[in-house]
Amino acid sequence: MTPPSGPRTAPTEAQGTSGKAWGLILSALALAVAALSSPAPLLAQGQSDRQHIVYFEGTPQELEIYKIYGRHEGPTIMVMGGIQGDEPGGFMSADLYVDMALKRGNLIVVPRANFKSIILYDRGPDGDMNRKFAGVQDMDPDRDRIEIIKNLMAESDLFLNLHDGSGFFRSVWESDLANPSRYGQCIIADAEAYTHQETGTVINLGQDARKAIEIINRDIPEQQYKFSFANHDTLSESSSHREQRKSASFYALTKLGIPAYGIETSKQLPSLEMKIHQHNLAVNAFMEIYGVIPEQPRINLNPAILQYLVISVNGQLPVAVADGQTLMIAPGDTVEVVHVGANYDRGLSVDVIGVGSLNDIRMPLAINKPTTVIARRDNQTFGQISLNLLPPGSDEPTPKLLLASSVSTVGAEAGWLPGSSPPPVPAVANGGGGRPTPPVTFPPSQPAIAAAGSLAASPGQAVGDPAGQPGPAEPENGVSGFVLEVDGQRTVLRPRETLTLRRGAKVSLVDIESQGPLPPETVMNLRGFIGRPGDTTGNDKGTTADTARDMIARFSVDQAGSQVFQLGAENGPELLAAAFLEIVSPRLRSVTLEANGQERVLALGQRWGLRPGTGVTVKEVLLENGLALDDPRFTLGGRPFPAQLPQTLAMPSIAVSLAVFSGDELAGKVVLFPRSN
């Protein structure tokens, strides 16, 4: 399990101040401020506590992952719910483990594996996601999430998939709702025992399931609701459950060699609360068996982050003002802060400087001069907005919200898990300046290259036209290249070429190289980047783009997942020439290891079994696309080791991930597991 390097978590949801109407208003305002300022920020957590990763944020495929780290080493249990959206007991139970603290061991929690199916309360609007782990089509909407989930499984020592099943499982027929073909109130495994072919490890599924059932049933007084063990014998040709060879638990067991179970409460239980409670009993039982020990209450020392203040002016419908923004009002207007949107609910106050008292929340105050409203949690200031006055006699409508040139919220980049295309990054308002982006157009005599971003191009390699032929190296309309400095190193990007950069690279837009003079109004424009907020010319020459923070995803010319941005020489609406910057997350290609005189090259996600205590030398780490690690960091089992290679480590007695980071971003990992021979 990888460590919480730069861990993040979502802010608490805004809650209304007085009744249903306020709740609706504040929900709408929360959406509005997200559109105006930035995506819902991911906030830093305690360095030894937890990590929150969000993929495909703001889409029906949104996937949230929570990694919870114990104070002491121990096994990692993965708990997943919501792979089938009409089974709320599972995903609502998994959601409760997000805020747990651990004394020993680790949890990986995926509460809502298929958010779209949950929204629609449908088993699988794009097909049953739990029948796609044996193979999934490239264009399947579930593909990327399945690959991410597979890699999370590989970090784990036990996989629990939470479901609500029909009826009540019984080993013998009792009734139409209670018989061997029903699923409710049981722990399902694919075998009584399974020997993993790669490692030779014998996994006694039935043994541990029965231990868990004994613990669970102590707290279920009703005989008809007690749990049983269901061995679906999935590997047998005579099994009536062979379709489950495509399931998540079967993949975890047979491909990764870890115990995996389906936990099924009955859809016929009398209440949702009972379903959630009994799922909790099952997860807690396996935590007890595996020695993953809770620690409550959790100590939370996260810094407070202000998302927005909800402000009513003269008793009108309130507006949401993001941290760092300015609200323009008329002299003498009455201002009331009615709500604080933050990642904490308690200990909050606001202070309108020079007016009112130390705590001015929900206090109508007349404002006659410019001032600042600061937000505090206890005694710590954690955000502010400005109140400014329109000139006397101004016909501007009030209140008027000005966009901030920079908003002091944490960036929404979620990091990278291997096995998936880079997730789409939500669009971020960047200063409110810039001009709208017209379609990419070329003179009729030149081939369009709108599809160039989908072509596999190395740094400096010509991407060519859509037919795949190499593009011309000669100048286009007098433009021979774009002079750039990438992390201080100068390079020239020729027209129609694509330069692949790691996310986070700093790109300075130096100049347009030309053969002869260009039209006097020619500008150097990087679409998706606002070099000078408020500048309507679109000229980015002389500015520097931070590719991790400054690029606006909706301007990518490739909307299929990659981030490819057009760098153009533009003369008004005419595009004279263009090249492209492809921004990729660092992704691990391979790790070269040596143990017992044997060298092994492990590709992303691969595993190697070694005897505990064996010395393992990490010799070389390579990334895809020929990229170099920026601020390289490595961990084994969540514990860092020096980044200067080679490094020799001792093989632990439990399965561990060897994780590779580029700065705070996870590039990927391989897995080492113990074996007896």
Image: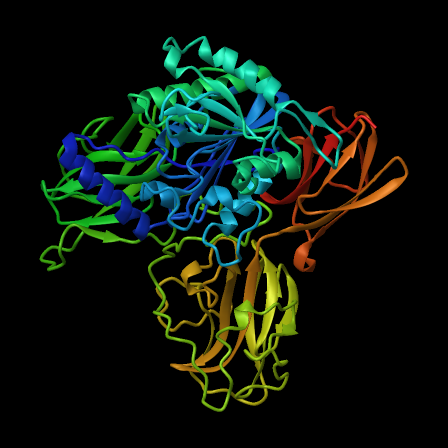
The colour style of the image is rainbow
**Left or right of 30: which side holds 626?**
right
Whether residue 428 is visible here, answered yes or no, is yes
- Quarter of the image for residue 93 reads top left
Residue 165 x %, y %: 40, 30
* Quadrant assignment for the N terminus: top right
Residue 49 x %, y %: 53, 26
- Quarter of the image for residue 481 reads bottom right
Residue 187 x %, y %: 50, 24
255 to 475, vertically: above or below: above
In this figure, what is the number of numbered marks? 0
Depth check: give the residue in front, 60 or 448.
Answer: 60
Residue at 41% from the left image edge and 51% from the top image edge? 126
Whether residue 103 is visible here, answered yes or no, is no
124 to 259, vertically: above or below: below
* Quadrant assignment for the C terminus: top right
331 to 430, vertically: above or below: above
Most distant residue in the right direction: 597
Depth check: give the residue in front, 331 or 226.
Answer: 226
- Quarter of the image for residue 498 reads bottom right
Residue at 32% from the left image edge and 48% from the top image edge? 34
Residue 629 x %, y %: 67, 50
